[in-house]
Amino acid sequence: MLRQLSRSFIPTLRSIRTHPIFSFIPMSESTTPAPVVAEATAPAVNAAQENVSNTTGAAAATAATAPSKKGSKKVKKMTKKDIDEVLMHDIVELRGHNHWDWDPKTPPPFQNFEELEVTIGSLAQSGEGLGLLPDRGEGWVLVVPFVVPGEKVKARVYRHNWGYSHADLVEVIQPAENRIAKEDILCKYFGTCAGCQLQHISYADQMKFKRQVVENAFKNYAGNYFATLPPVDPVSQSPLQSQYRTKITPHFEAPNPKHRAAGTATGPVPIGFLQAGKRRVVDIEECPIATPILNDGMKKMRAEVQQNIASYKKGATMLLRESNPIIPGTESEDPPKTEKICVTDHKANITEWVGKFRFDYPAGSFFQNNNAILPSLIGYVKQQLHLPLSSSTTSSAPSTSTSESASATAASSTGLNHQIQYLVDAYCGSGLFGITCHEGFKKVLGVEISAASISCATNNLVLNKLSTETTAFHLDDADKIFAHIDFPSSETALIIDPPRKGCSEEFLDQMVDFLPARVVYVSCNVQTQARDLQGLLDRCSAKGLPGYKVEAIRGFDLFPQTRHVEGVMTLTRL
């Protein structure tokens, strides 16, 4: 979809407001050097992406004055939106209960930068480790990055919240048997760069972790219906675990104007990605999860920035994106020959190939960044769209006939479900799903609220030589997203691929009014996906409607070595 960089952080999740407001000690920048790991098994990562943040909440808050103590600093008061609710669920599960006695006016049970030894009990959905300190603060929890459950570690505290504190990893005292050896880790920056969280564990263990993330999301945010859901399927692996990212956004800070004026600004400016636990840039020469063409482009970009650094009054975020344009003179070949290039202008055109389909879009807009897994993801979505409908759905459809039932029976051999004749691609963006999944439908309609996205999707329709009579893209307001859809709902499938914040309340209301026979919900944020499922089923129940059956839930690993997992959920109308 043509969404700007809106997928970087997990948003505050509405309807999960179970925790009161508490005070916390203000964030202090961590000062920990690279951690030491016993028996030479230390972490070491890199990464560059809009999905790089290690944390999922913690925004700025209103300041207040702390109790008068020597060396005390201002204490900030948290509001509900500042509490990291996803992390809170993980902490509650570790502690075994959802309340602990701690007066918010009382300081945490240790000081900033105090070093503590703790055994890691579990991994949070952020990829960070959680360690319980039962003898501190009625069971305080430390949140420590780059660790493995079961390890005993030394950590240095740098930020406090209600009932838990964030800490830097100082040393792994007793490494877990399944920790990846230092020499086998992909990136020399791991443990410093904030981009990757999981390079220190095997890919098989990453898949187990991400499957648990998906399951926990539905347990925590669709709890009213969790017992009725099918088991979460194993996560579909990425064909590439490194060199897969087709877009990176390194950044840098310009030299301090005072130092520049005084002539004391010396040395090259760090150009790279944010440091874990800090608001400073790590100088990154190469990112192992980026494609080779992007790493070549980053070398040139770094040299150009250093050469022209005096012209920058402020820092900047750079864009490097892989494009695969057709080589001139080969347009008539089937398929045409292409070349890989690195694009740095956010307004320039990008050409991406997904199987036989071509997609053009502006470099600064959104498109999936792991091309290697897209054929698998789209193939699964197509399969789910054409699953046989339940008997209750087909019997409720006024157009169902004996011949249609026979067609449905034959669908198992063709892979198509002829009970579903129409496809709606909501949040269609540049038309990825509407175009790649068009086969087997009488008509396909993509809907978006962005005029630029609709223009791009329509252009891609022409590039792929699809009939505009059977496939089209339509611009509509958010509160009228289904207004121009005249397909019979009992014969219509709906694809949803919203931004990280999930579906709007207005969209869910309209979806319940329309009630498509099949829904395939693709999400880059499984927490909001689960929340939307509960919102959808609650709305159906409130209107006395049978609702939907969840056929399947599966994760796709679009971002190996990181905590992120894409979720795909299939629903059938009852």
Image (cartoon, rainbow, N blue to C red):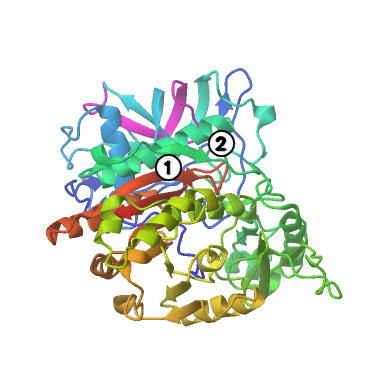
Q: Camera-side residue: 465 or 24?
A: 465
Label 1: which residue? 126
Q: Which amino acid, mark 1?
A: Ser
Alpha-carbon span between mark 2 and mark 1: 22 Å
In the figure, residue 270 lies in which quadrant? Answer: bottom right
Residue 140 on the magenta segment: yes
Q: Position of residue 370 (x, y in %)?
A: 61, 53
Q: Is residue 178 above or below residue 257?
A: above
Circle 1 residues within 10 Å: few <14, some 14–19, many ≥20:
many
Q: Position of residue 468 (x, y in %)?
A: 55, 81
Look at the image and give the residue range highlighted in magenta.
Answer: 135-162
Q: At 17% across and 58% down in the image, what residue appears?
A: 545
Query: Does residue 416 appear in the picture of this structure?
Result: yes
The numbered disc on residue 293 is none
Give left or right: position of 342 versus 107.
right
Q: At 73% across and 54% down in the image, what residue appears?
A: 295
Give left or right: position of 185 versus 229.
right
Label 2: which residue? 33
In the figure, residue 101 lies in which quadrant? Answer: top left
Q: At 43% across and 38% down in the image, what residue appears?
A: 233
Give left or right: position of 378 versus 355.
left
- Callout 2 secondary element: loop
Q: Position of residue 54 (x, y in %)?
A: 46, 46
Could you tell which of marks 2 and 1 lies nearer the N-terminus?
2
Q: At 70% across and 53% down in the image, what residue appears?
A: 291
Circle 2 residues within 10 Å: few <14, some 14–19, many ≥20:
few
